[in-house]
Amino acid sequence: MINKEELLMRAAKPSDDALKYHPFFKGKIQMVSKCAIRDMNDFAIWYTPGVAAVCNAIAADPELSYEHTNRANMVAIVSDGTRVLGLGNIGPRAGMPVMEGKALLFKYLGGVDAVPICLDARNADEIVNTVRLIQPSFGGINLEDLEQPKCFTVLDTLRADPAIEIPVWHDDQQGTATVLMAGLINALKLVGKRMDNIRVAMIGLGAANVATVRLLVASGARLGQIIAVDSKGILSRNRKDIELAQDKYPDKWLLCSEGNEDGLDGDAGDAMRGADVVIGFSKPGPDTIRKEWVANMAKDAIVFPCANPVPEIWPWDAKEAGARIVGTGRSDFPNQLNNSLGFPGIFRGALDVRARTITDEMCLAAAAEIAKCAEDRGIDDDNIIPTMDELDVFPREAVAVGMKAIEQGVARLTMTREELFEKAERTIRASHEMAQLLMREGAIAPMPADL
């Protein structure tokens, strides 16, 4: 018997703890040195006068910036705070705790140094220009929590810009879609259905679901079998509002004109009727997706309500309504479809081969490897995807991404599979050991028990 009251209390605990511990630690990240400092004389090497020789070397050959500085392992997390989690437009200052958390995950799970950069930007052009200006300092750019259609404009503009020499990635699009695809690969194996023969209802058509559509089609799903729903209803050929705004929302118009081959109209419940899979990235719940809608889905339904911080439907309600497999974005429920499984390993692989971009094929390679990591140790209905403490997934994912980048000709460095794994595993292990050392020596205070 499900104790719903106990489950709801457990679901509220992370928020309660977060308000206690954030002010105690005054944030989650800091800068530490990585070079040896034997005595004050060493600053003649690391700073003036010795550093001038390094500056001249880079001026003569800009690629040496990857060798003489930390650029090869440095990512900027760029946000304007307009679409933070499920909280909406809360601004750059309120978005900073999320970006710090992102940097923490980058470091601990991927060994990647990441810098939160929350911008008081007013439009897409300001963000695009900022990224152009800061790229000499970084090996990659992680766009985060940008509202639509700004998020599409910023990403597409920067990826198409020949002056951008480093990967620009939008985690809410590419990262979330990659991990969701990994979960879907294994869920379909368990229910005995094929990617090219499923009906998919998509609730919400923001950044994550737009990217998911792209990866679904690249994986063999038919666009006509995808039925998307936004705040005004099902996307169909009858949506004149989208037709008139197709220049602004081309992905929505594509789903109106080429998706939904049965020409359905109505609401989310109509879209879900008979669907094999429902993917929610919409308004936080509960009850954004209703139990009766789940009950009307196909046999062995797969339900992925991924809104944060509260999924569109609680997992226990979806199961009671007949769903066989349920995954959410939360770590306190089974089958966490969280992009934290994706971006640390994907950037690790991209940085290690100095990729110029992160392609959809690199994302699909990551998704396949994440799914295989789970399959190798065994999957079941409540265990379709690795958890973040299965740390072998991140170097394996890095290898898959790096090898695909080399295959596609977007890597500056060529390495063997074995060399990539050794480098990724060593870098990530060093990050874990550093965190443990700092805690053991008291440089990081222990978690207080009395807050």
Image (cartoon, helix red, strand yellow):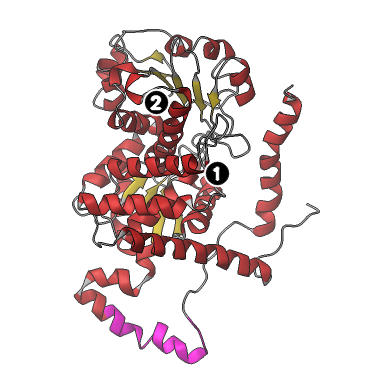
The span from disc 1 to disc 2 (Cα, nearest Å) is 26 Å
Can you tell which mark lies on residue 94? Answer: none
**Secondary structure, magenta segment, majority class:** helix
Can you tell which mark lies on residue 387? Answer: 1
Say which quarter of the image contains residue 326.
top right
Q: Identity of the amino acid at label 2?
A: Leu
Callout 2 crowding tier (Cα within 10 Å): few <14, some 14–19, many ≥20? many
Point out residue 36 in the picture as x, y percentages from the top left corner.
Answer: 48, 82
Point out residue 98 in the picture as x, y percentages from the top left corner.
Answer: 53, 47
Point out residue 377 in the picture as x, y percentages from the top left corner.
Answer: 52, 43
Can you tell which mark lies on residue 205? Answer: 2
Instruction: Left or right? Give the position of 67 relative to 88.
Output: left
- Label 2 sits on a secondary structure element that is loop
User: Which residue is at 39% across, 25% downward?
Assistant: 205
The one of 288 and 55 positioned closer to us in this rendering: 288
Residue lying at the far right of the rendered structure:
450
Please tell me how many numbered marks the rendered image carries: 2
348 lies above or below 256: below
Point out residue 260 in the picture as x, y percentages from the top left corner.
Answer: 32, 14
Instruction: Specify start and end residues of the magenta stretch as a single range.
Output: 36-55
Say which quarter of the image contains residue 258.
top left
Q: Identity of the amino acid at label 1?
A: Thr
Instruction: Left or right? Give the position of 409 relative to 151.
Output: left
